[in-house]
Amino acid sequence: MTLRVRVGFTLIELALVAAAIGILLVATIPRFQQKTQQLRTEHTAFELMQWLRYAREQAITGGRPVVWTWDKESRRVVLEALDDAGTWLLLALPTGSRVTLPEEANVTVTREEQPIDCRCLTFAPDGTSGEGSGQPTVVHLVFQRFAYDIAVDAPTGRVTLTAGSAPR
C-alpha cells in the first residue's frame, strides 16, 4: 500500500485567503490614514513648539529681545532679534531647519482668548514673554482633523504642548 501526501493548496483555498487579506486591508487603510494625519499634526505642533523654545533661548543667550512671528502669507515662522542699534534683524536659522508649514495647517495666535493680529510673541532677555496680563499666549494649530495648543506662560516663558480640540 502506498501512501499519498497532498502537497500545495487548491485554487479555492488560495482565493479564500486572498479575499480575507483583501477585506483586512480595506478595513485597516482608513486607520492608517488617520494615524498618518495625527502624526503629521503632532510633528507640525512639535516643530512650532521648538521654534518658540528656540526664540526664548536666543533671547536669553543673546541678552536681547527676540520676536517669534507667524507669517500667515508665507506660512512660516520668522524669528527677529533687536540689535544694539535698535534695528530688528532676522535670526539665522540652524542648518537643515524646516519652518514652512503645509498649506492645510491653520495657525492662530491668541492672548487672553482673543486673536492677535500681529501673530507675534516677544521673549525678553530674562526668558519671560512679557505679553498681556499674565495669561498665556496660545498658538493653536489645526491640521487635518487634529488640533494642538502650544501655550507660552508670560511670567516664566515656559512653552508647553497639549492636545487641543479641532472644530467639527
Image: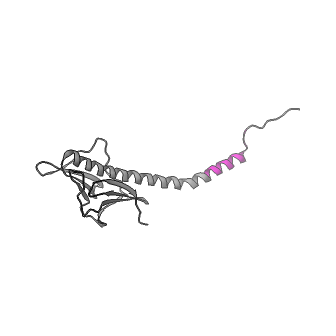
> In which quadrant will I find the C terminus?
bottom left
Looking at this view, is 60 or 95 the one in front? 60
- Residue 27 quadrant: bottom right
Q: Residue at x 26, y 57 (%)?
A: 155
| Placement of the N terminus among the 4 image quadrants | top right
Most prominent secondary structure in the magenta stretch? Answer: helix
Residue at the top extreme, as displayed: 1
Q: Is residue 19 above or below residue 3?
A: below
Tally the numbered discs: 0
Q: How is the image coloured?
A: one colour
Q: Is residue 44 above or below residue 116?
A: above
Question: Picture coordinates of residue 9 (x, y %)?
Answer: 72, 42
Question: In terms of depth relative to the viewer, which is nearer, 42 or 11?
Answer: 42
Tell whether 118 sits left or right of 103.
Answer: left
Q: Position of residue 10 (x, y in %)?
A: 73, 44
Is residue 23 inside the magenta stretch? Answer: no
Rendered location of residue 125, percent (x, y): 20, 50
Residue at horizontal 61%, vertical 51%? 22
| The magenta segment | 8-22
Residue drawn at (32%, 53%) of the image = 159
Q: Position of residue 71 (x, y in %)?
A: 26, 56
Q: Residue furthest right?
A: 1
Task: Answer left or right for 19 relative to 144.
Answer: right
Query: Please, which residue is most extreme toward the left here?
Result: 85
Q: Quadrant of residue 142?
A: bottom left
